[in-house]
Amino acid sequence: MSGWINKKRIMHIDMDAFFASIEQRDLPSIKGKPVIVGGIPGSRGVVATCSYEARKSGITSGMPISEAKKRCPKAIFLRTYGKKYLYTAWQLLEIWNRFTPLVEPVSIDEAYLDITGSIGMLGNEEKIALLIKKEIREKLKLTCSIGIAPNKVFAKIASGLQKPDGLTIIKDDEVDKIIFNLPVSKLWGIGKKSEKVLNRLGIKTIGELANTPTKVLKQWFGINGELIQRIAKGEEKNKNIEIIPLDKKEHEKSIGNEHTFPEDTDSIDYIFSELMNLSQKTGKRLREKRLGAKTITLKLRYKGFFTTTHQKSFPNFIYKDEEIFFHSKALFNKIYNKKEKIRLIGISLSSLLSIFDTSGNPSIQKELFFYNSKTERLYPVLDSLKERFGEKIISRGKVLQYAYKNI
Ligand code: TTP
Ligand code: MG
């Protein structure tokens, strides 16, 4: 395998037990103890994260607080404090930016850094990693795990190999020995189901996946066969191997979904149920990217292919399924011409804001990053269930009502 060597040195940094470590830092009496962040017992929240001490009891992100309490009755339960975590994320960004201009934050507590150009100036890569760890430890009193490899995919795997407070460096000529011998489950995007299928095909390691004829993978995984192979080769989704710094990172201009009805329809209930479905899909994609939207556009295509769009903008950012549904329904009621049947309906969200946009209002960004109220807390759970079991697993009542009618 030589295609993956792009002569770059990419670092992936991931903070350890991020929310929990911040809480332990700020409240020394809970240091070294099992700490669970996400809600207090009796609340219906889920675990956002927990300290490594609590992980020994089998507690994981996304687990209901009630279950976590059963598994670790002595744990200290804390509510999340979004503003504080976001502030820390920005402080981290400031530190990382001092080591290379090529920093790509990918979530609240992790980033890729292209350190290829910094190596000559700041010392070897190990030294750079240790300097970054030192800064974070001294300035923020937190620890992180770092992986360094020839590309983003392998760097991310590397950072997870020795958590917490780890440093794993993978030289170009060590990829075969280290990365390619790891199980396929270590790859982004390979869930339990795909792992089973791959294992049945005799593909157990990342290296075996990278070297399997693409034809075979396509047979079993369709178009995704090619994608998972590309990831195994270290090419990532969309062949995006470059680091995109924040000021150059253009998040999507818009996020949208459309649906063509199997038969043209004028049933308002049916149309609204599909609109709800589209709202959920679009909302999920928006939240996955930690974005909020200021504008919503509804698209209608009538039976005779005549297409019309209508949009509305708001002073605040929206990101909830219900909000998207509410506004798209209002737009529909405004423009629908009752005389003709509908062939296609679509929703698009634009004027997007990311939690990492420095121009945005911090309180809105905090909201985008963390959903506070009871119903909002549902979103990460719903989204992760959909992620694991597919879009159809959970749906609002209206969509289900139609799904059952059509069985
Ligand atoms: P992660 O980096 O996935 O987890 P972590 O930093 O807590 O632990 P690790 O040492 O394994 O990296 O996520 C970063 C933060 O994002 C985490 O502290 C809390 C938040 N989060 C949620 O709110 N919900 C989730 O389901 C996950 C996975 C994370
Ligand atoms: Mg982390």
Image (cartoon, rainbow, N blue to C red):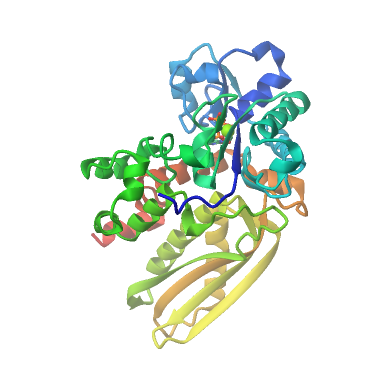
Residue 164: give x, y in percent of width and height: 56, 24
- Left or right placement of residue 7 versus residue 339 in this view: right
Relative to 122, say whether 56 is above or below.
above
- Residue 135 at what x, y percent from top left? 75, 29
Nearest the camera: 269 or 120?
120
**Residue 39, can we see it?**
no
Total numbered badges shown on the rendered structure? 0
**Which of the four quarters of the rendered structure image does ligand 1 lie in?**
top right
Q: Quadrant of the C terminus?
A: bottom left
Q: Is residue 261 above or below residue 46?
A: below
Provide residue 263's location: percent of width, then percent of height: 31, 76
- Is 159 above or below relative to 69? below
Residue 383 visible? The answer is yes
Picture coordinates of residue 66, whole percent (x, y): 46, 23
Give left or right: position of 365 versus 310.
Answer: right
Q: Residue at 55% of width from left, 67% of height from top?
A: 348
Taking the image as shown, residue 24 lies to the left or right of residue 280, namely right
Depth check: 24 or 361 in front? 24
Find residue 191 and report its image quarter. Answer: top left
Front residue of this view, candidates 32 and 176: 176
Which residue corresponds to the image point at 73% horizontal and 21% vertical from the top-left?
26
Residue at coordinates 29% horizontally, 51% vertically from top-left?
212
